Image (spheres, helix red, strand yellow):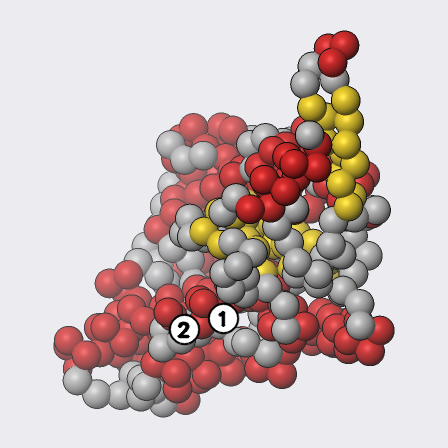
Amino acid sequence: MAREEIKKRREEPLQSASGGLTNTPEADSNILKEKEENEEALNLRPRKLSEYIGQGKVVESLGIAIEAAKKRGDAVDHVLLYGPPGLGKTTLAYIIAREMDVGIVTTSGPALEKGGDLIGILTHLKKGDVLFIDEIHRLPKAVEEYLYSAVEDFAISIVFDKGSHARSYRSRLEKFTLVGATTRAGLISSPLRERFGIQRALDFYTIEDLCQVVKRSASLLQVPVDEEGVREIARRSRGTPRIANRILRRVRDYTQVRHHGVITRPVTQEALLLEGIDEEGLTTLDKRFLETVIVHYKGGPAGLEAIAAVLQEETDTLVDVVEPFLLKAGFIIRTPKGRKATDKAYLHLSASGGPKTAISEEQLSLLTRHK
């Protein structure tokens, strides 16, 4: 009976979290190639490690692991990638699958609500396939426990029936590579984290690396842009390639409608003024965050829950989207009592016409000296 159940699971269609497409053993399991066919013209993601820009040590480490696995005829060791959103974690997962010439199945932590969801995916994986779980820190505990034996022993234990009639069947799995991505590595449990043989942090990009990203994307989109326009886009992209590509598309639209020419620095400045992105790359939400700390809490310290309540935003949005760049750029600092605005935040908001009422005499004198 147990073997029949496993066989039935293998014959059922597999649903990927990326669009709900189904995949059977008889069909082409290489979802990566299918996505290439449908999105080749619009996909700005690099497809090989040689095309990947930035994150030099991460790319070099993965390149060595992939080459070694190919020589052994083995699967790549399990990989954990963590860092702020938009830095290329998903892109690297697809690159690993492409470099190994294997299929990839994508899902996310919140999508796997029950152990059966994960079992259905695992039993469909072929030898060497990549299972990519985004936001892996949000896996339910019951689902996470199935992963322990799956990634370590490549086997899962399935319990049938209940009570005195319960019986367990241990099913072997094909050797696969688990790639986990998270924006909050600290929330991953120790037992799961320790099962990843390769753990790499992705950091914000330099302006020079972002200039290369913008040039490459502009070439793929066939958008004319000069050197100053490239640098202006890169400078306002918050150290994030995803944001750089998004800004490039918006500036392209603005240029086509208003200027009908090459993207230059003045054109970029006009377009981003309309988008609400300032010279430092801060958005309206970023500035509201800083204004809340400065005006409502007199510069801080202010608790995250209190800031979220004033902004009417989810705390997860502030932690994952807003805070990482503000911390990196030096606009806020974290203290045991909460978030505090730095002198740089006061100066920036004052220069851009922000609130001056909350600035102390000491900070006003500092502002005067800077001017």
Compared to 258, does 78 lie above or below? above
The reply, left or right, for residue 324 in relation to residue 348 is right
Residue type at mark 2: give it: Glu
As drawn, which residue projects farthest toward the top? 164
**Quadrant holding the N terminus:** top right
Which of the two residues, 163 or 189, is positioned nearer the viewer here? Answer: 163
> Any mark on residue 196, and which?
none
How far from the left and from the top, in percent, is residue 109? 58, 41
Which of the two residues, 222 or 300, is positioned nearer the viewer here? Answer: 222
Which quadrant holds residue 144? top right
Q: At 35% across and 51% down in the image, what residue appears? A: 284
Q: State whether residue 190 appears in this view.
A: no
The reply, left or right, for residue 48 in relation to residue 78 is left
Which of the two residues, 39 or 49, is positioned nearer the viewer here? Answer: 39
Q: Kindly identify which residue carries mark 1.
A: 33
Which of the two residues, 218 or 348, is positioned nearer the viewer here? Answer: 218
Q: At 56% across and 32% down in the image, what residue appears? A: 113
How far from the left and from the top, in percent, is residue 220? 39, 83
How far from the left and from the top, in percent, is residue 238? 49, 63
**Quadrant holding the C terminus:** bottom left
Q: At 38% across and 60% down in the image, what residue appears? A: 351
Residue type at mark 1: give it: Lys
Compared to 84, does 360 lie above or below? above
Which element type, helix, strand or loop, lies under badge 1?
A: helix
Which element type, helix, strand or loop, lies under badge 2?
A: helix
Q: Kindly identify which residue carries mark 2.
A: 37
Q: Are marks 1 and 2 in contact (CB under 8 Å)?
A: yes
